[in-house]
């Protein structure tokens, strides 16, 4: 089955600490993965996609096919990073996204 | 903050009543989606539509129905057959097959069934 797993419901760190939000996937084809973010009282929005290999708001995510992972990382967390983060896998054959259960990141001062 | 609008923001209904949630987009996107968001369960896909007059069931379609008569509109009806309808509902759209991984979301509707 094609699945996205985010093992942590809550990740709490202090400002300035490194952050790693874990995402593992199972997919038989060539995966296309995304990170979405939902800040408090804002809409869910795309943060980054693996195919772009970009850094957005200091976040990066590298696709590791050997470990079937797509962890989201930031070297120094900021309070404004506090949000709900969802990892998503594109099922291109079915033309739909499969989302993980999400991880709430809380950055304390 | 246009793009995708959902109305109403909050909706209360009595058990046994059908209710329709509105979703409109002015992004000229072909594809539209309905998700249900529950604490600890992430987003689960209810229905999606890649083109006008066509739609497919998602992972949790039972008790729901949709229509796609216009490109810009994709209303969701929560029927009395849905066993646990109280939830936060999100609508999204994407621009064609090449960009289906990049979805744009509405603000959501919180449905409470009393």
Image: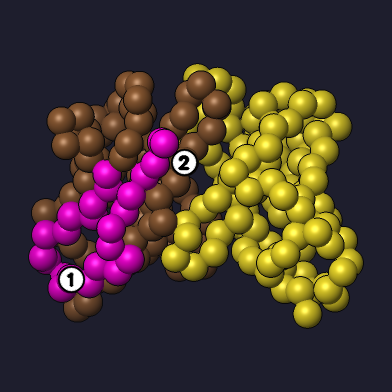
Chain colours: A brown, B yellow
Q: Earlier in the sequence, mark 1 or mark 2?
A: 1
Quadrant in the picture for the N terminus of chain A: top left
Disc 1: which residue: A13
**Side of B21 where A96 appears, left or right:** left
SS for callout 2: strand
Residue at (67% x, 26% y) in the render: B50
Q: Residue at x 64, y 66 (%)?
A: B87
Residue projecting furthest to the right: B17
Residue A21 location (% of width, % of height): 23, 55
Whether residue A81 is visible to the viewer of this picture, yes or no, is: no
Q: Using a 10 Å C-alpha cutoff, classify the residue at mark 1 as few (fewer than 14 neighbours), some (14 to 19) or many (20 or more).
A: some
User: From the viewer's perspective, is A16 left or right of A11?
Assistant: left
Residue visible at 72% across and 64% down in the picture: B83
**Which chain contains the residue that carries disc 2?**
A
The chain carrying label 1 is A
- Nearer to me, B6 or B77: B77
Residue B107: in magenta span:
no
- The numbered dot on residue A98 is 2
Residue at the extreme front of the image, as rendered = A1
Does the magenta portion include A8?
Answer: yes
Numbered circle sitting on residue A75: none
Range of residues picked out in magenta: A1-24
Q: Are marks 1 and 2 on the same chain?
A: yes
Which percent across, then down, holds residue B15? Answer: 83, 73
């Amino acid at each position: 089955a094609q699945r996205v797993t985010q093992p942590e419901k809550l990740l709490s760190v202090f400002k300035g600490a490194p952050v790693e939000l874990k995402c593992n996937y199972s997919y038989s084809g060539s995966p296309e993965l995304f990170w979405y973010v939902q800040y408090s009282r804002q809409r869910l929005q795309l943060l980054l996609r693996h195919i772009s290999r970009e850094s957005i708001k200091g976040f990066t995510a590298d696709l590791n096919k050997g470990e079937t992972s797509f962890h989201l990382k930031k070297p120094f967390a900021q309070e404004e990073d506090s949000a709900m983060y969802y990892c998503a896998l594109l099922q291109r054959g079915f033309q739909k996204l499969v989302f993980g259960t999400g991880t709430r990141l809380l950055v304390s001062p | 903050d246009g793009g995708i609008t959902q109305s109403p923001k909050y909706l209360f209904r009595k058990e046994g009543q059908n209710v329709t949630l509105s979703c409109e987009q002015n992004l000229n996107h072909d594809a539209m989606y309905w998700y249900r968001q529950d604490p600890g369960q992430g987003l689960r896909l209810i229905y999606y539509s890649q083109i006008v007059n066509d739609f497919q069931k998602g992972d949790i379609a039972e008790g729901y129905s949709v229509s796609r008569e216009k490109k810009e509109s994709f209303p969701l009806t929560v029927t009395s057959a849905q066993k646990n309808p109280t939830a936060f509902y999100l609508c999204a759209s994407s621009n064609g097959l090449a960009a289906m991984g990049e979805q744009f979301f509405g603000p959501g509707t919180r449905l409470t069934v009393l």
